[in-house]
Image: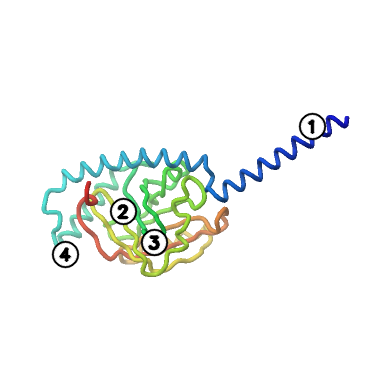
Amino acid sequence: MNRALRILSITLITAGLVLLADIGITLAYEEPISSIHAAIQQRQAEDELEETEARYAKAIPAPRTPTGRDRKRRIARLARQFGRQVGEGEAIGRIRAGQIGLGTVVVQGTDTASLRIGPGHFPDTAFPGEGGTVGIAGHRTTYGAPFRDVDSLAGGDRIELEMPYATFVYRVQKTEIVDPSEIGVVRDVGYERLVLSSCHPLYSASERLIVYARMVSERLGPPAGS
């Protein structure tokens, strides 16, 4: 009996140590298994996106820089066409924010599978260039945690969205914490706006952290070097 109790005690202690180690690794390294999965998926998404950019580079003839209303109309037309072509989980662009070291491929959709690849575009919101609110959600703790540090973004910080048809620059307006049921954060407000959404606080889904940014410029054509 004593031998059986000793074995059970050792088993329970070992299991507890493994659990504590797993929690520690998750806190320190954003859950390594899901991070590896996300890294593989991101590489595949990057390859897919590069192919799309190459097609647009050929389809948009020089010069790429019509001015004023002509440029905006052309970008809007390309944005609508692009939105009709992409499917759930497909790579659609890149999001960059140098202040927090963010630079990752964005996919279409915010379902579980799509968000395991990278930040996902809310299907019911506009595409950049269409004149409305662009909503993008991302993980903060698992699957590469692309939005882990979005809470560090401050007013005036620069965010870029590189789409195959144009590149857009936004400036952060504000951040706020809302209830997960608050869907009004992605409503249209009469100008081009970017809304980033992620769970808050870290390791919890009890609230949502929202970052609002206003578009300040756009450039027709794929990113430089595509």
Nearer the observer, 107 or 3: 3
- Spatial separation of the CA atoms under disc 2 and disc 1: 60 Å
Say what amino acid the circle numbered 2 marks: Phe
Quick one: label 1 or label 3, which is nearer the N terminus?
1
Coloring applied to the structure: rainbow
Q: Residue 44 at what x, y percent from top left?
A: 36, 38
Residue occupying image coordinates x 66% and y 42%:
19
Residue under label 2: 127
Asked whether, in this view, residue 132 is left or right of residue 139, the answer is: left
Quick one: label 2 or label 1, which is nearer the N terminus?
1
Q: Quadrant of residue 220?
A: bottom left
Question: Which quarter of the image is occupied by the N terminus?
Answer: top right
Quick one: label 2 or label 3, which is nearer the N terminus?
3
Asked whether, in this view, residue 72 is left or right of residue 154, the answer is: left
State the mark number for residue 68: 4
Quick one: label 1 or label 4, which is nearer the N terminus?
1
Say what amino acid the circle numbered 4 marks: Gly
Front of the two marks 2 and 1? 1
Residue under label 3: 99
Label 2: how many Cα within 10 Å (few below 14, some 14–19, many 20+): many
Label 1: how many Cα within 10 Å (few below 14, some 14–19, many 20+): few
Dots 2 and 3: beta carbons under 8 Å?
no
Q: Secondary structure at mark 1?
A: helix
Say what amino acid the circle numbered 3 marks: Gln
Dots 3 and 4: beta carbons under 8 Å?
no
Q: Quadrant of residue 56?
A: top left
Q: Secondary structure at mark 4?
A: helix
Q: Secondary structure at mark 3?
A: helix
Residue occupying image coordinates x 83% and y 30%:
4
State the mark number for residue 7: 1
Q: Residue 40 at what x, y percent from top left?
A: 41, 38
